[in-house]
Amino acid sequence: MRQILCTGVAALGLFAAWPHAEQTPAPQTPASQTPPPQQPSDIGATISGDAGNAPRLAVPAFIALSKDAETVAVARTITDVLWDDLNYEREFTFIPRDVYSSVPAATSFSDVPFDRWRELNADGVIVGTVEKVSSGFKVEMKMFNVRTQQAVYPRVYNGSNARLFAHTMSDEIHKSQRALNGVAMSKLVFDSDRDNERMTGTVQNRNNKEIYIADYDGENQRRVTVGKTLNISPRWSPNGRSIAYTSYRRGGGQIFISNIFQGTIEEVTKGERIGENWLPAWSPDGTRVAFTSTRDGNPEIYVANRDGSNVRRITNNPAIDITPTWSPSGTQIAFTSDRSGSQQIYVTAADGGGTAQRITTESYCDRATWSPAPYNELAYASRNGPGFDIHILDMATRHMTPLTFGEGTNESPAFSPNGRHIAFMSTRSGKSQIFTVSRDGKDVRQITRTGNNEMPDWSKLPETRP
Amino acid sequence: MNRARRIVLQFAVVSAVIAAVACHKHAPPVARPTPPPPPPSQDTVPVRPPAPPAPAQEPVAVPPEPLRDDAIASASIDDLNRSSPLKPVFFELDESDVSAAGQKILDEDAALLKRYTTWAVTVEGHCDERGTAEYNLALGERRAVNARAYLVSLGIAADRLHVVSYGKEFPFDPGHDEAAWSKNRRAHFVITAK
């Protein structure tokens, strides 16, 4: 008990430096001022491209309204991060930045050189100003239709975190212009041995693994556990405030939940004769956790309430059943079983009733992750000979699409909250590292570079947080 | 080779102890108080009193040495686990059955466990990197459970053998070839109490 309390306090200490905005679920929301009445409302005010093509946008540098270094730096960061965030979803075509120098820079919203942007064939231009105020910065952003010179999406934000300004704008632009839930505010979680802390004990040289989080783009990597042991397989709770994971702090693998903003820890699997317990997976409503347990002598899938009560066995087979994931509806659980003689993905009812249905017919599949709606897919690691590749299987058509192609080994896929990206572990650059890739296999990005980083999970949409 | 060295070491320890005990019996060197020197007389040449005998070395206390037993019984748990008197069992790829060769190793391990009846042991299951990190947790468990079951069948009490699976988290050889993999597919024994 004392150990838990101490760990909790330490975790709290880690988060003392957490941006203030993160303490409240809806950071840096638009200021309360409503747009001036002469401007059109958000609804229906979208910029479209020619004949169904993606709109062509220009994102010139945000205007620093004072020339002090801090304001100039914030303006530059917002411009760069907004550019990256908007590019990530590929919903817009962008006028390349290298031609921007040929366009006179605006000094305010009133001298935007619309004619020049039109010559460059832009449909829209995003113009922003950054002003230093007593509480931090006031950022004003307008998205102009270049032809009508109308501001279709005027916004004012107050805050202090430059990256958060950009992430908020990007998500709002995607939502209002493309009816898309962007992922700019989402976060990754993974385990890592980067701190080179050694396990206590007499055996080999073994590194602890601890749980780390990062922004979706790899920025702000932070450690969130002080387990001083092997801590693996982290999973975000649906509300993004807790992380369930497997920890060996009691000797063998057990399921723990860290409430990362409170710095508290809960034990999900506890008591006598509970065997080893691994690989938690949250139910979509966050009230239950599925996991693998050897409590009855053989690895089987169980579901418990998040406080560990009401443990129910879901599978019953002398083979190995492991690595559960929930369907978005919460009614089904996919898992890995070697009951056929090889490792394959099966789906069964989350209440344990009925027979498990085999889904894959490859040589060795594991770590299925169910996509969010509107997609109905399973991503999993599939053996390709020496290692693994990430495959995506459409549950309706049973059509399989490979996402990686034998560069290193590729394991542990996790869908982004909008289903358009996948995080995974790959050894393609040497050690185990976290990467993200678009669902069409393009835009591979390396997220981690220090130590070994494995078993990623992607947070759910901030809109769904309480 | 090792055993020979151990015997020599034991012999040296035993000799040292005997020597220490023998010394102790002969003459416990105690500094006796000398009478105070007479007051110096002015008209005689001052005669320096003989220097008091230098304080003899206190006998060094010898820690209780388990003379009755061998180096394994006397070693610390840390040293024991470093030299691994319990030999690991190795497995084939994706396999968790104990092979005939593995049974031979476990027979020897069981003999040790029967000799040192107070030992409690963690049976660690390990895998090579060619399975997934997730599935390997269960595969490692199977390997440890099967090794434990074989030891129990030889009469080792089940409650002395605690099973933990580390999957592929702690490879013994970080290499990426069969030589490394074959070392990493194992049930490994760690003595936790003696």
Image: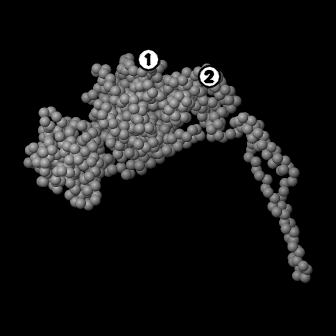
Q: Mark 1 highlights which residue?
A: A340
Q: Which amino acid type corresponds to the residue marked 2 in the rendered image?
A: Ala
User: Picture quarter containing residue A202?
Assistant: top right
Residue at x 20%, y 43% (from the top left corner): A95
User: Picture quarter containing residue B14?
Assistant: top right
Residue at x 43%, y 43% (from the top left corner): A450
* Residue A317 percent coordinates (x, y): 45, 19
User: Picture quarter containing residue A137?
Assistant: bottom left
Q: Residues within 10 Å of mark 1 (few under 14, many from 20)?
A: few
In-image side of A221 versus B27 (left or right): left
* Residue B2 percent coordinates (x, y): 71, 36
* Residue A225 percent coordinates (x, y): 44, 43
Front residue of A119 and A330: A119
Q: Secondary structure at mark 2?
A: helix
Q: Check the image and report above or below for A286 versus A36.
A: above
Q: Mark 2 highlights which residue?
A: B101
Q: Secondary structure at mark 1?
A: loop
Mark 2 and mark 1: Cα distance apart in space: 28 Å
